[in-house]
Amino acid sequence: MESNILVIYTGGTIGMIQDPVSGALTPFNFDALYKHIPVLQNFNCKIDTYCFEPLIDSSNMNPMFWVKLAGIIEENYEKYDGFVVLHGTDTMAYSASMLSFMLENLNKPVVFTGSQLPMGVLRTDGRENFINAIEIAAAKTDDTPVVPEVSICFENRLMRGNRTNKFNAENFNAFLSGNYPLLAQVGVHIRYNHQHILKPNFKKLKVHKNLDPGVAILKLFPGITEAVVNSIMTIPGLKALILETYGAGNAPTDPWFLQALSRGIKSGITIFNVTQCKGGSVEMGKYETSVQLGGIGVVGGFDITTESAIAKTMYLLGQGHTGLTFERLLQTPLRGELTIE
Ligand code: ASP
């Protein structure tokens, strides 16, 4: 049966073509979609498009745009079988993570894609990424979508959105899913790894639009000073701090450092321990350098990415969660974003 797909263009390199006169990159006119990519006419699906107004470079992404994007999907949810979100690559991993939390009971594909080279450039990776994303968003078995979750389709890989980060600013292969297997590998065939794809729950979609931006990230580095840590821990209104630690969740054992974190926790800030590594998990207590973090009440983030941790804290705080419930939910996989060892 024919699938109906809604393509939502938010901005970014993929939707640009070179102006033949000025040579400058300008947004692509989506009314002429089939003119630019005639092969789309051969798909057994109907494609409609929605363009953000204004289009944004994804470096300008913020909670307001996330609410808008989630709202467009909500309003069109019943009309379409799947959604393709064309998005700049810079913050795509954050947006895909956030949408995974905002769209509770998602039973349809929301496939993010973009490109490193604009669509109008001869060697563009955008054309292939776009066509693959549409095919994946339209894929069904027995009338049930094959990938009913938020994903990122890039180069020849399909990844769970909330497991990704952008790790390369130049290569076509720009995204990594360091802690979770690919959802599909795109080659001559699209090979789906069904056992790693979330199953539909057939419940009604619930869209959460309250996001609380009272969060911050502190990335540790050798030589970090007391003044830096203290100033972050005393930011007015800060509710959660993502602490990017070394390796398996390790941090300095200097008393001033632990005392600064401890004062912050006592003042009501939740500290979420996420590793700087692109693969592997936080294991507080494995080394002496993480034992004390657990002792003062830092919450271990297992193998969650920083992008997903930011999204999850904003989402949970926006739902009004605080204290122990907030901490428990942070450590509970809600959308397949972390693995508890
Ligand atoms: N700066 C652009 C953006 O993220 C880069 C890209 O689209 O790849 O919107």
Image (tube, rainbow, N blue to C red):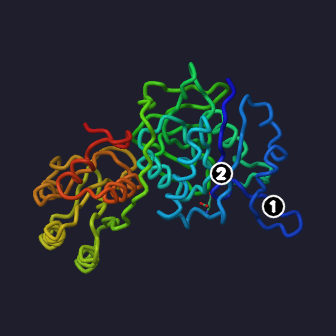
Give neighbour class at mark 2: few <14, some 14-19, many 20+ (Cα, 10 Å).
many
- On residue 115, the disc is 2
Where residue 213 sits, quadrant-wise, is bottom left
Q: Which residue is mark 1?
A: 18
Disc 2 to disc 1, C-alpha distance = 15 Å
Q: Residue furthest right?
A: 21
- Residue for point 44% across, 30% down: 202
Q: Which residue lies at the image location 62% right of the left edge and 64% below the top edge?
A: 56
| Residue occupying the point 64% across, 25% down | 189
Location of residue 276 by image quarter: bottom left
Helix, strand or loop at mark 1:
strand
Query: Where does residue 238 sit, x and y in percent of width and height?
Result: 28, 70
Q: Amino acid at mark 2?
A: Ser
Q: Position of residue 246 (x, y in %)?
A: 29, 56
Front position in the image: 278 or 113: 113
Query: Could you tell me which quadrant the C terminus lies in?
Result: top left
* Label 1 CB-ligand 1 distance < 8 A: no
Question: In front: 145, or 337?
Answer: 145
Amino acid of disc 1: Gln
Q: Is residue 281 left or right of residue 253?
A: right
| Place of residue 25 in the rendered image (x, y in percent of width and height, measured from the top left) | 76, 64
Image point (62%, 42%), residue name: 155
Q: Which tag, 2 or 1, sits closer to the chain's start?
A: 1
Crowding at dot 1, Cα within 10 Å, few <14 / some 14-19 / many 20+, comes out as some
Label 2 CB, ligand 1: below 8 Å?
yes
Taking the image as shown, residue 214 lies to the left or right of residue 89, namely left
Ligand 1's quadrant: bottom right
Q: Is residue 286 above or below residue 143?
A: below
